[in-house]
Image (cartoon, rainbow, N blue to C red):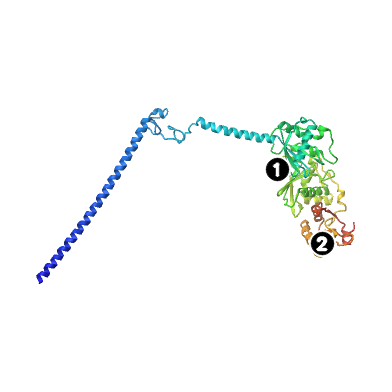
Amino acid sequence: MADRDHRDRDHHRDRDRDRDRDRRRHHRDRDRDRDRDRDHRRRRSRSRSRSRSSSRESDYHRSSRRGGSGFPSSSSDLGPGVPSGIPQPIVPGGGAGLMPGMIPSMGASAAGGLLPNLSAMSQAAQAAQDKINRELFVGNTPPGTSEALLMQFLNGAMRRVNLCPPDVTPILQCRINQKFAFVELASIEYANKALNLNGIPFLGAILKVARPSKYAGPHVPAQTWQQITGQPLPPGVSSSIVDASAEEKVNRELFVGNTTPEMTESMLRDFLGRAMEQVGLTTMPGNPITACRVSGKFAFVELRSQQEAANALNLNNIPYLGTSLRVGRPSKYTGPETPHGNWEDILAKFMSGELQLKNVSAATEAPTPVSQPAAVGVRPTPVVELKHMLTQQDLEDDAEYNDILEDTRDECSSFGTLKNIVIPRNGPGATKIFLEFMTVEDAGKAIAGLAGRTFDGRKVEAAYFDEVRFANEDYAD
């Protein structure tokens, strides 16, 4: 029994040993097959690489024999002085044999495609310049003027004075823009002749006909309408208005800066003109400012003479609507520097009777004193009288009356220190406003800033008022 058990154990041990040996043999065979497959794949990959390399070499030799695109096959293809056998790069779009950095020659077809474009651009530029040479500026047109009416009037005027044949319409188009216009004529010749319309009367205005600012052609001599017709200018109109000299116009033009959006052309013209009249900066009766152009935060004013333009430089820093206007020469001015003061200086000299102005047409002459204008009325005092700002209806309601007092105080305090405001609700001084300032200079600033302003269609009058009568509450005229 013991022997049988021993034999069984030996049998199981031999069987386990055989099974382990078979398992190890199986693993060795599997590893061997895997290594063989890997070697096979490597050999196949190297074979494909040699095949591709051989194909590229064959293609290169075939291309070289055919003489097609690619590297040149002979030194004759490389140009003089280049040895054969040196590969040359291909420049895209330029053919073979070009060295790096070389520009390929342009074919006839490509050049022919560019020339028509250059020609078209040149023709367009020439047409634009021709249009500028046929265009004229027409200034001082009355409000409400229509394009058709202005064209009809100017065409008829040119026919009437033989600036064109009677059956020709020289003006083809017209563009109206507020107080000026642009007209386009049929030819440069007619544009040159139409310059003689400068100064022609139209609906109570005197038209200014000139070249536009973008015109860069030669100067064409021209006369004025008065010269070719013999008609005089209307009474009170200065000959400088129809002066065709661009240089002379620049000398009569001033820049006005620091304007506010509520300032209109008519407001600036009336305010600055009235200020010049009140302190004696004018050389003849009437508003010295003939034109005003507002553009955003600045404006340009044109005066009727060079002397008054030089005098108007003294308006610099004049207060208006809560701001101080900056008055000076425009950037295109190239004339001599004109000595001048600021508004504070000119007002102080005017108050003391020391105001003296220099004639810019004869700068070397001694300055001449300017007399006090009669419009000022009484002697300067710290009290200002305002008329036509209010109506009797404005004074009836207590709340509205108090609002007027407060608004007036806020507005007029910008001119200086305000001591007192009196607005009589009845009696001889009803609808008037009386302002008492600390100094005469502040009162003068208020007069310059308020005179000529418009309230509900009424033009305000501002003047000095006798301080003794004001103290005695004597407000009668």
The 10 Å Cα crowd at callout 2, few under 14, some 14 to 19, many 20 or more, is few
- Note whether 183 is above or below 394 in the view shown: above
Question: Which amino acid type is shown beneath numbered disc 1?
Answer: Ser
Q: Which three-letter amino acid code belongs to the residue tagged 2?
A: Asn
As drawn, the label of residue 331 is: 1
Instruction: Estimate how packed mark 1 is, as few (under 14), some (14 to 19) or many (20 or more) residues with alpha carbons within 10 Å.
Output: few
Q: Of 416 and 151, which appears nearest the observer?
A: 151
Q: Nearer the viewer, residue 3 or 99?
A: 3
Q: What element carries label 1?
A: loop
Question: Which residue matches tag 2?
Answer: 420
Quadrant of the snapshot with the C terminus: bottom right
Q: Can residue 422 be seen in this view?
A: no
Q: Residue at x 87, y 60 (%)?
A: 430
Residue 197 coordinates in the image, percent (x, y): 78, 35
Left or right of 72? Residue 3 is: left
Q: Distance between the residues labelled 1 and 2?
A: 43 Å
Q: In which quarter of the image is residue 72?
A: top left
Question: What residue is drawn where x is 72% and y is 31%?
Answer: 189
Q: Is residue 146 left or right of residue 90?
A: right
Pick the quarter of the image with the N terminus. Answer: bottom left
For residue 79, side relative to residue 144 (left or right)? left
Rendered residue at 31%/42% (across/down)? 48
Tell me the SS state at disc 2. Answer: strand
Q: Could you tell me residue 427's position as x and y percent?
A: 89, 61
